[in-house]
Every structure is written in structure tokens, then in C-alpha cells.
Amino acid sequence: MESRSIALEHEPDIVVARNEVRRLARALGFSPTDQTRLATVASELARNVVKYAGHGRLIAQPITDSDGRTGLRLIFEDTGPGIYDLAAAMRDGFSTGGGLGKGLPGSRRLVHEFQIESSPERGTRVSVVRWT
Amino acid sequence: MANNSSAQTEQTRRVVDLLAARRDEILNLWIKERLESDEFRDELISKKELRQQSQQLVDALARSIQASNGADFDDAEFNELRAFLNQISRQRAVKGYTPTENATYILSLRNVVIPLLAEELGGDTAALVREMDYFTRLLDKMGLVMVENFIRSREEIIRQQRADMLELSTPVIKVWDKILTLPIIGTLDSRRAQLMMEALLQRIVESGSTVAILDITGVRTMDTLVANHLLKTVTAARLMGARCILTGVSPAIAQTMVQLGIDLSQITTRAQMADGIKLALELVGRTVVPAALVAHLRANGTAPGYKPHEQSAATNNADTKQ
């Protein structure tokens, strides 16, 4: 199955990202609960891009590991200001935007693999994987 | 450097001269070309309007080239032309043109101007190539502006439509005296959540309700933002003396909420809307009982207003006497 790339600029793009990820997850054979988990992660991380960077994209890649297991990798990248204190941002309850502070740490709990890189020069890149 | 800029002025004067000297001829040819093309749609634009637009465009183009001394389209002197292009592409977006039709309109000016330019410059091939190159680059940029702005205008229209739909989709329904329900369906973004909260609080005041059932059966994804909005709504309703009951939490959403680490324990929840209504009735001091039971009570004379004319009441009466 092909990768999909979705522009993230406005709030409606978050909805598009969420629905597209759910569709892909369903097509890859993820359970309904896993579809919801992936759609929720897409919603959280896409919102971060729109809210803090204003411009970026989501790349959704179906992947297979050496045992033939299917997974879905979601990459969120932006060229925004970056995250000032990455360690703090990954802690529960930390928010600079008036939210619940559960977006990043909660998203990490919803996936099997979670990588985040952020710098003021290059912006932020979050890559997550969930296996079926 | 000075030499170079005077050479540029020299070469671009030719196009401007042409646009000025043979303006009407160019316009006639261009409009004829448009009218004969498959793309002309007289249901979308009248010939008169097309002529007017084209004339303004050619004039603005000539003015911009002249004022900028033959600079590129990025020059500030082209701002007027750019604004005009933005205006007509927006009009066309509203009218339902396609992006191709929009770009072709601008690009087709080349088919008219280039032959005339060749005629004008005679055998001076070097000058013709320079002028063609300059003019074509300008038109390409103009075509791109048209397409880009056209798409932006379409997006604006879609956003507006979406906003219009939002207004309609936050119904607050009164199910019983002092009990409201709010069925939440689809996507709950910030704006919609805000509208929803306002509508609910307003209705709580108007109807003097003390219980509100928020049903999320129709919500497929609940992220931290939505959860945050729900928590705020519940808190605000509580400040106004109303209690909220959350119903319709699917197993998938329940598990996701727990993993996200969102604490909804301060909200009373029930699996289904029906259970929510039952609880709400209890909270306002009412209960739902089978009609037969009511009849039974009446038959025993324990309830006021008893009238012994119903057959079922009579049967019940006989049963109880055994």
C-alpha cells in the first residue's frame, strides 16, 4: 500500500489527517480499538503542528517488519520554532498552550515506537509506529 | 551595470509600445480567440464583461511594464496588476470555473501578442527572442497567480460552507422537564466545542434545567482537546447549577482515554443514552415504571384519581384478590 502525505495548515486538515489515518489503519487490518488509537495519535500530533508551527505535514507509511508483521508509521514534520524543553514536553501535565498536557506523553503510550527530534533551526519531527 | 539596465529598458519598450499602439487590435484578437475556444462559457461570463476584464488587464499589464522599466513580475510596480488578477480569479472561483480555464485565459494572450511582436520586429531575431522570453515569463507568473489565488478562493468557500454547517449542528434538546440532551456527532474542534458549550449553557438558563446529558455515541475520535472541552463544559454547567452525564462512550474510546491519561472520573458516565436518561429522571425526582404497575396501584386504591372502568385494571384487581 502506498504512503500518504497530508498538508497540515488549518484545523480542518487535522480532521482530514485523522480520517485518512483511520482509513489506512482499517485497510491494513488494525482492530477497531487500534484504529481509534492511531486516529487519536494523528489528531494529537497533527494539532501540535497546526497549533505551534502553523505549517507542516503528515506522512503515513504502511510498513512490514522482518517477521511479516504489518504496521503503520506516522511522521509529523514541521519547520516551526521547535520545542524549547523536550524533556518537560514529554511529561504528563506540561503544557505551554493551555491544554491538558497529555498530548505528547499520551500519544507515546498509544503507540509501540515513538521518536521525537526538535531544534529551533530544523523544527520538529515526530515519528511513531504501531504494529497490528 | 548601467549598460545592462538601459539595454533592459530598450528591449521591454518594444512590448509596451506594441501593447499601447495596437491595443484594440490585440484586444479584439484575444477576445475572438477566447470566444472561439472550447473554454468560453457564456453562461458564466457575458461578452461585455469579458471584454471589460480583458481591456483592464491589458492596460494594467502595459502600465506595470512601463512603470517598472521592464522588471520581473515580483517588482512592486506589478502590485496593481497582481491585485486585479486576484480579483478576477476570485470572481471566477465563485462562478465555478476550473483552474485550467482560469490559467488558459491569461496564457492565451501569448498566442495573440507573439505573432504581432514578430511582425513588429521584422527580421531582428535577437530582439524577438528577448521580448518573447520576457513576455512569456510574465504571462507564466500571471497564470500561476491566477491558479494559486483561484485555489485559495475555493478553500475559502469551503471553509465558509463548513462554518455555516457548524452553526446548524449543535442542537440542544429538551427531553423532559429540567433535563436537556446534547447529542454530539462527528468532529469536535475548538470552534464547534465553543458553540456547543454556549448553546448548552444558554439553554440551561432558559429552561431552568438541572441535568444535561452529553451523548458522544457519534464521536469516533476523542483526543485531549475534545476531552478538555468536555471537562470545561461540565465545570461551567456545574457553576450554573446543572449536573452533566456523559453517555455513549465506546470501548475503543474508553481504552484510548485511559492510555492518553485523561481523568474523566469527575464526570458521571453511563454506557448508553437510555441509562443516562434514567439517571437524569432520578436526579429530578422522577422514575419510569411499567404502566401495568401504575394500574395495579390505582386498582388497590393507593393512588388518587382512581376510576374503575378499564378492563386491564379490573383483571389486575381480580388477580390481587387471590
Image: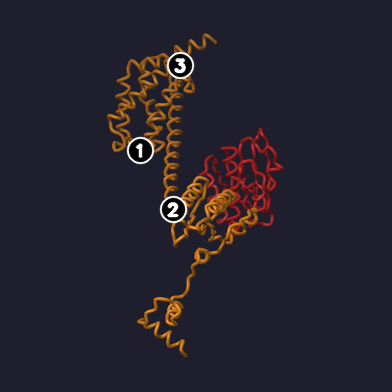
Chain colours: A red, B orange
Where disc 3 sits, the SS reads loop
The residues bearing labels 1 and 2 have C-alpha atoms spaced at a distance of 43 Å
Compared with A16, A81 (above or below) is above
Residue type pointed to by label 2:
Glu
Q: Chain of mark 3?
A: B
Relative image position of residue B286 (x, y in whole percent): 49, 67
Q: Which residue is found at the position 30% from the left and 21% from the top?
A: B25
N-term mark: 2 or 3: 3
Where disc 1 sits, the SS reads helix
Q: Chain of mark 1?
A: B
Which residue is label 1 attached to? B95
Residue nearest the observer in this picture, A120 or A122: A120
N-term mark: 1 or 2: 1
Which residue is label 3 attached to? B68
Q: Which residue is found at the position 43% from the left and 88% from the top?
A: B318
Residue nearest the observer in this picture, B220 or A66: B220
Relative image position of residue A71 (x, y in whole percent): 63, 54
Residue at the limit of the structure toward the top, as seen here: B3
Left or right: where B302 falls relative to A91: left
Identify the image quadrant of residue B221: bottom right
Q: Which mark is residue B206?
A: 2
The quadrant of the image that shows the N terminus of chain B is: top right
